[in-house]
Image (cartoon, grey):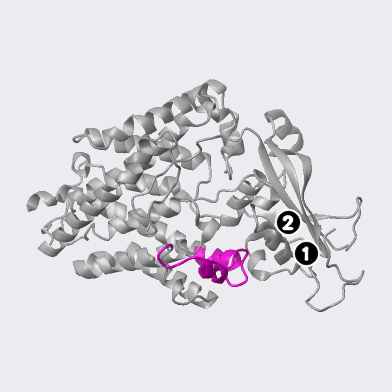
Amino acid sequence: MRWLTDPGYWPGRLIFQRGLAAIYLLAFLCAVNQFRALAGERGLTPVPAYLRRVSFRRAPSLFHAHYSDRFLEAVAWAGTALSAAVLAGLADVVPLGASMALWAVLWVLYLSIVNVGQVWYGFGWESLLCEAGFLTIFLGNARTAPPVLILWLLRWLLFRLEFGAGLIKLRGDRCWRDLTCLYYHHETQPMPNPLSWYFHHLPKRLHRVEVAANHVTQLIVPFGLFAPQPYATVAAAIVIVTQLWLIVSGNFAWLNWITAILATSVVDWRALGLAGAPRPTAAPLWHQALVIAVTALVAVLSYWPARNLISRRQRMNASFNPLHLVNSYGAFGSITKVRYEVVIEGSADPDPGPDGEWREYEFKGKPGDPRRRPPQVAPYHLRLDWMMWFAGLSSLYAEPWIVPLAERLLENDPAILRLLRRNPFPDVPPAVVRARLYRYRFTTRHERRETGRWWDRRLVREYLPPIGLRPAAGSTPSPDIPGERM
């Protein structure tokens, strides 16, 4: 059964596996730094309450057996340490079975976090990491030649990722069809980066060329991934170049990085003068049998995403099973033409009135102070900042975590404050907190020279009226204790 392996893809597998281990490392670090504040026992959407509503069958997770913030942190730190060890090469120096076990543990740990992460883990790149991580379990290690069937499953994943994103655009916002979406996108994307202002001010002709090139890359090039070499390598190279372009123009967590890493598994490195393993050995029969079984499983599960691709009601970033295997993908089927931002402020005065002093909270990644240049965040993922972008597009009642966020700020909650760039009340918590909705736009070149500002903003309306902490149960509210909504 030598046809099941191809030593020539040994360098591509090595690059892909190390790259995926690096993404795992980032993902687990995100959980270490953010999960407790967002979904912990006193988080904005607490996991214990979620687990009481959701069965193990619907959301498989280690945390159905037990959840505590300490246990979550132990799981996240274990994933961090294990992914760092795999990145350093541990999976390549142990026997094949042990290597598979390492990758399987990473997958189980991260799947357990994703399946209880609720809205904070509802992004397409979470399912993408779970699916890629599952396939990597069966990809073998340095001691064996890469299994051809798993390599083809990685191509099928990359195809769905790119082609699905292309179709959702073609079926979605009209601006994708008339090539004008990039007139707005660099300014209104969830989290612009340091170069987004410059990309926004490129000539409109170039923006139209960018959109047309995107259609070619996502609607035509993906079919080349299944072509004979060297055409598949050319298709993969185009995907990688496109992802690098997206990386330098915006902050999309690890979406673009993992897409480029997937494309490296398609490249025929022999054509680039890189040979395969010195002495690759065929995988044992039990491993080959597992590879065939996994291929059959993916073939069956592919029915739903394949049907979704040809459906007029294509779903974007949907998982059809609780293990997040063989998902549908897509991004920016519609483009926001105007940028709205929720700005949270606090006041030391329990009754500040219309002319009271309000101080603004500053987030690490999302726009706030118009003078602050958009930062580079990706491939790290600031989950609260991303959800604040969605909050600006919806009503207060569509984002039930906003009020708990305000309450934590009223308490100067250390876990929440660690997610922010600046707390304007470092010593004493504010008496009241409010949120206001602003319209943001990039300044023009002239405005930038004159004012030094990257953004211009205008107040639209109140988003969350001023609130103070509620009085404890059984206590009597008094004018000296801020406890009522204002």
Q: Residue at x 54, y 25 (%)?
A: 180
How many marks are shown on the rendered structure? 2
x, y (%) of residue 101?
27, 69
Region in magenta = 31-58
Marks 1 and 2 sit apart, C-alpha to C-alpha, by: 9 Å
Q: Residue at x 51, y 62 (%)?
A: 117
Quadrant the C terminus occupies: bottom right
Give yes or no for contact between labels 1 and 2 (Cβ–Cβ under 8 Å). Answer: no
Label 1, residues with CA under 10 Å away: few <14, some 14-19, many ≥20: some
Label 2, residues with CA under 10 Å away: few <14, some 14-19, many ≥20: some
Q: Is residue 247 magenta?
A: no
Name the residue type under label 1: Phe
Taking depth in this image into account, of 304 and 418 the one nearest to the observer is 304
Q: Is residue 378 above or below residue 174?
A: below
Q: Secondary structure at mark 2?
A: loop
x, y (%) of residue 465?
80, 54
Residue linked to disc 2: 361
Q: Is residue 35 magenta?
A: yes
Image quarter for residue 374?
Answer: top right
x, y (%) of residue 8?
16, 47
Taking depth in this image into account, of 375 and 2 the one nearest to the observer is 2
Residue linked to disc 1: 425
